[in-house]
Amino acid sequence: MTETLKPVDAPARSTQYFARHAAPPNRKQPTTYAGLLALVVLLVPGHRWWAVQVLLAPILLIVPGALLLQALRIPARFVSSFPAYIACASIVVLFVSGLATDLLGPLVGVSAPLRTWPLLAGFEVVCFALLALSLKAPADTAIDWRFLAQPSGLGWPLLLPLGAAAGALRLNSGHGGGVALIAVTAFVVLLVASSITALRLREALLRVILFAVGLAWSWSYSLRGDGVYGFDISTEYARLEQTISTAVWHPAHVNDAYGAMLSVTVMPAQLHALSGISGLLILKVVYPMIYGFFPVAIFDLSRRVLSTRWAFIAAAFTISQYAFIEIASLARQEVAIVLFVALLAAMLETGIKRRPQWALVALLALAMAVSHYSTTYVAVTLMGLMLVQQWIVSWVRDLPRFSGSVAVAFITTLVGAFIWYVPVTHSDSHLQQVSQTVQAQGLNFLPNRTAGSSLLSDYLQGNTKTPISTKEYEQLVQTYYTNNRPYIKTLPYASESQYRLRSSAVPTPPVKSRTGYEVSGLGLLLIEQLANVLAALGAFLLVVRRDTTAIARQIGLLAIAATVLLTLIRLSGTLAAAYGQERAQLQGLVVLAITLCWTMQSLAGWHRVRTTLVPALGAVCLAVVALNTSYLANAILGGGVSANLTNSGAAYEDFYKSTPELAAAQWLGKTRKPGQLVYADEYAQLPLEAMTGIQDGLILDVTPETLNQHAWVYASRTNVTDGRAIGLFNNHLATYVFPSSFLENYYDRVYTDGSSEVFYR
């Protein structure tokens, strides 16, 4: 089967579908929506039962979005070509109804508006208002739900997330990683096999495969441990639990960019109140389901430029990055990045009337702005650069000088973010910190550069965390505390030689095949760097070629902007500190993966031999990347694997949190008095943040010469059981023996549960 190099426009394909399956307009659809809204009212009182929770969750994430899209007069063929619109529109409705209930409730005497019944009333009022607005909508805006009645053959990929969940839960209960290994192997094989056979598969099935693989990959991590898995998500969970317990959200969040985001406060609190699902499971189970639409959205956006096979590879390559799992550990960015792709799709749509398109673009932009600030900053930068480039290119190529939808997206995002972060929530401290850092040290190019290293190696290494010796770390923090934290008064015994820090490396399994291990790592590096070059080249060619469509040229402009931004973040330590380069890269790949695969698709079309050779090469490259990022290569060849496959290793020690650890953190949070100092190492802070929200007075360097004479010290499972601690100084990591002997000699052990401890003096 040969591949059609010129893809059919997605809305056009939907039009062809409706022409082939023409049916009278469904006049019963408003009644159906009203019935579902009534069903929500009937089910909510019984939401303590899991079966009811399973029914309510999808209704809350589908019905509101369908109503909003129909009320906006978005033609159904555009929705069918980009199903993520439904989930994103539902998020918009949940934001609006939840925030309106929260702000208006106290005005009518409801002191705790984020409880079940006030939120249910607000949700129903907003949804019925949208239903009323959609009654006179044209027939072509009625979403055709007949795809739900398609053969069950589309559902089999959804077994993958169930397998991944089973593997994670078995690891949590102390069993081996066999099931987890099988599940990871299955979805990597399916991803690669589908890229080869994409031309023979229906697009609906390809969407399900991408959703299933993305969800399986996320669940294999998010379901690990008794608490949330990851770094930022610990603080997000604390903010969510605070919102749930107080049942009210206040706009003012000075220096608190987590609590200012509706994606980790009002919306999950509303989902909890209506569906009955706990806040913990919303972050561990439901949010990864929303995030599962991310690869599907990339596929649908890519189809406007690419053929089916290469659109699938573009989405598969994006979710095969290490950063895909990193974002799965940031609840607010899971929501924001899906909204970001939907925003790009909406502003690049052709064929929708101006008013509904601009309305949809504005709503998605505002929803993204109140979901995650860093995603918003990158989006504003890309769209701003695109507008400037488009005006310049329009003088030499067939392209409008001004795109109204892009301008609406840019202005709405910029103004909405400013209003929300500054006068409404006062949560713009992160911007102030970046500004102060730039003024103090400039852009800080290649901060990890060392004497004798080459510029190329420093660039490839980027602004990642690099290891340093324990001795160097000890000296650096001691000097820093002496000069910058004079209020810390250490004990006179801290400088004795027996209390000097000693190195303690995380044990890793031996490498079985050194050659295979090195070839695998080198292959990943070469593929990623070649992908960067081809993506940049494709972006340039899409812009300058004469026979490029307007939407392809606009995607090329966005990709050029992304290339410039990602290069700056990789070079600048200041920008990397403000926004991690891995997460920025994943957001940039939304468009760069398209230009990368457009280049590959063009190469495949030059000669008959290349028609099969280039796709095969693409599948091989995808396999190499997926095998490495899933840690299957390490499972086969030896070396450390991640926590999705084992109960050991660096990721397990850093992020896996058990019930005793969480209980110890909760005890400390209740016992510690305001203003008292608390010490915990870089990753022991996570249970404290998740269970107590302690930030003021929290110090992350647990060494004898940085411990105050009067302070609390929290020791996690890794500190107690493995006897190891981690320190981070200026993006440099050191692993050392936890100073338990010093603590036991000069501090009192006031809490222990066998796997975690609390000291006080």
Image (cartoon, helix red, strand yellow):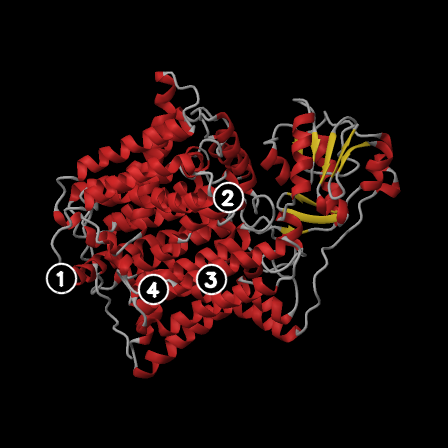
Check disc 1 and report the residue beneath it: 19
Label whose residue precedes the other's in the sequence (4 or 3): 4
- State the separation of the CA atoms marked 2 and 3: 19 Å
Determine whether, in the image, residue 214 is placed left or right of residue 694: left
Q: Which residue is drawn at 28% across and 54% down?
A: 82
User: Are discs 1 and 3 less than 8 Å apart at CB?
Assistant: no
Callout 2 amino acid: Leu
Circles 4 and 3: CB atoms closer than 8 Å: no
How many other residues sit within 10 Å of disc 4, few (<14), some (14-19) or many (≥20)? few
Spatial CA distance of label 4 from label 3 is 15 Å
Residue 488 in sight here: yes
Q: Are marks 1 and 2 in contact (CB under 8 Å)?
A: no
Q: Which of the 4 image quadrants contains residue 369?
A: top left
Q: What element carries label 2?
A: helix
Q: Which of marks 1 and 4 is in front?
A: 4
Residue type at mark 4 is Ser
Q: In the image, what residue type sits under mark 1? A: Ala
For label 2, the residue is 281
Q: Which of 37 and 255 is in front in this view?
A: 37
Residue of label 4: 152
Residues 257 and 136: in front is 136
**Pointer 4 or 2: first along the chain:** 4
**Image quadrant containing the N terminus:** bottom left
Mark with earlier residue (2, 3): 3
Q: Where is residue 185 in the image (x, y as percent from the top left)?
A: 52, 67
According to the picture, the residue beneath numbered tag 3 turns out to be 160
* Dot 2 crowding, Cα within 10 Å, few <14, some 14–19, many 20+: some
